Amino acid sequence: MIFEKFRNRISAVSTILVVVIGAGLLSSPGCKKAEGRADFELIQDEILTPNCAFSGCHASTNDATYAQHKLVLSAGSSYDALINKSPQHPTALSNGWLLVKPGEVDKSFLFHKITCESGHHAGNIGAPMPMGGKVLSRGQVEFIKRWIIAGASKTSSAVDDAILKDSAACQLTVEPLPPPAPGTGFQMTIDPFEIPKNFEREIFVRKNTPNSDTLFVNRIQLRGASNSHHFVAYTFRNENLLPPLNTLRDLRDPVTGVLNQSTVLQMQNHIFLGGGTDVNTDVTLPAGTAIKIKPNLPIDLNSHYFNFTNLVLQGRNYVNFYTVPRSSVQYEVKMLDLNNLEIYIPPFTRRTISKNFTFPTLTRVVMLTSHFHKYGEKFVIKIFGGARNGEIIYTNTDWEHPLVKSFTTPIVLQPGEGLTSEVTYYNTSSVAVGFGLTSQDEMNIIFGYYY
């Protein structure tokens, strides 16, 4: 009799537990019901496919950028391409990271590239992902983080699907760049400004350097926000035609998108001073060389951001100019800005475009870098003319983080000799691509320094 009563009580308790569990009342945070889809299936369908695995980015080995990242994130390929694979980025490699290291989120490069958490971007690890103005939500980033911590399985369902409902944008804020110590340089900034949804905003702000005496700069350090296309500092050819001081000028009207012709005309007065595509870079000129900065030099700060989301994003930029004593400067450098406007790439076509640039006087090149856009596969610079004609002195395959190459022994070019830009593009789109000012157009520019 006693045993029968005890058995009835167990049966009643079991029935209650079944009802409670079935109602989800005992589900612990972070656990899913067994019938949920696999975590990686959700990551593929809701994050990788719409944000990463499209033509021009990580869709296939035919993407123009594949040589840079060697990463395909399309369905059926992405898991094997990520798990325990080494990244191409040199900083990530030197840190000992893998693209995804199961169980170790801080050693997974994928997480560092998508997170907006502070403290995950020490050193230059390149632009946050995804590119193209897309922004992952906090829920999407958190889901990937927990998937990695749980072991990054291809088939398990260990992470709560409800995390994906957090749709707040995971936009990385710009950490303030500390200015140079007193007596070692100066800082210039572009204050925070809005980038309207589904818009590319390129702005200019003319400022004057704060120095009352002549200075010599041999290091330029940049910092900018995610979704930036470039950040460049220019001086002016004719200082009698300066734009207004401390006034933000748009290249395009933020409402209509129409080019502001006055801004376009002001761009014709520019001389490259420093900067480029990678807005988080730090460049030092070879020892003994420096840029001469006269007192209160007018500088045009130029920032370009793209935003292909339905959110209003924010841009902000810093640039530090570090100085050296006049006594340490043997040569005052000038700036190279060699631009080829004759660009035309038909749809679905790979094309190499070359142009020769010659110099009228003896020229000693001490640093080179390049600028092209997302359809650029390879940027090669060769010597043109003389005994070294055709010699390759620079090769870059990463349009987002172009190589900056210093020459401790200068490249000496006699009058009439020069440089050749030889750029290979792969237009993976269905429309022809030519020279233009947006991220959907192309460019072909050699930047650098010489004396």
Image: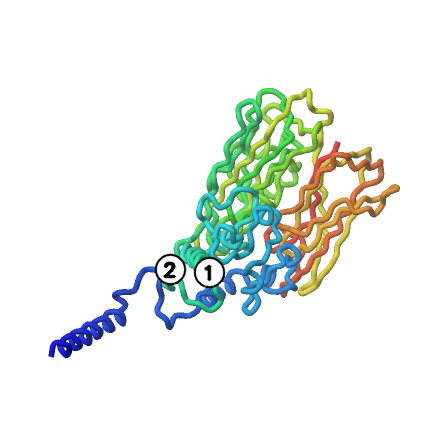
Residue 395, how many percent across, how many down? 72, 48
Q: Please, is residue 396 above or below residue 45 in the view?
A: above
Locate the C terminus and report the quarter of the image it occupies.
Answer: top right
Q: Residue at x 46, y 58 (%)?
A: 148
Mark toward the viewer: 2 or 1: 1
Q: Please, is residue 164 above or below residue 244 in the view?
A: below
Q: Please, is residue 410 above or below residue 347 in the view?
A: above
Residue 278, how many percent across, how many down? 59, 45
Q: Is residue 174 among the parts visible in the rendering?
A: yes
Q: Counting residues from the N terminus, which is met first, the one under dot 2 or under dot 1?
A: 1
Q: Residue at x 49, y 41 (%)?
A: 316
Question: Which residue in the protein does label 1 denote?
Answer: 151
The one nearer the camera, 374 or 139, is 139
Give left or right: position of 172 versus 340: left
Give left or right: position of 390 versus 10: right
Please state which amino acid type lies under the numbered disc 1.
Gly
Q: CA distance from mark 2 to mark 1?
A: 17 Å
Q: Quadrant of residue 331?
A: top right
Q: Quadrant of residue 440?
A: bottom right
Estimate how packed mark 2 is, as few (under 14), some (14 to 19) or many (20 or more) residues with alpha carbons within 10 Å: some
Please state which amino acid type lies under the numbered disc 2.
Ile
Estimate how packed mark 1 is, as few (under 14), some (14 to 19) or many (20 or more) residues with alpha carbons within 10 Å: some
Residue 149, how many percent across, how many down? 44, 57
Dot label at residue 328: none
Question: Which residue in the protein does label 2 denote?
Answer: 163
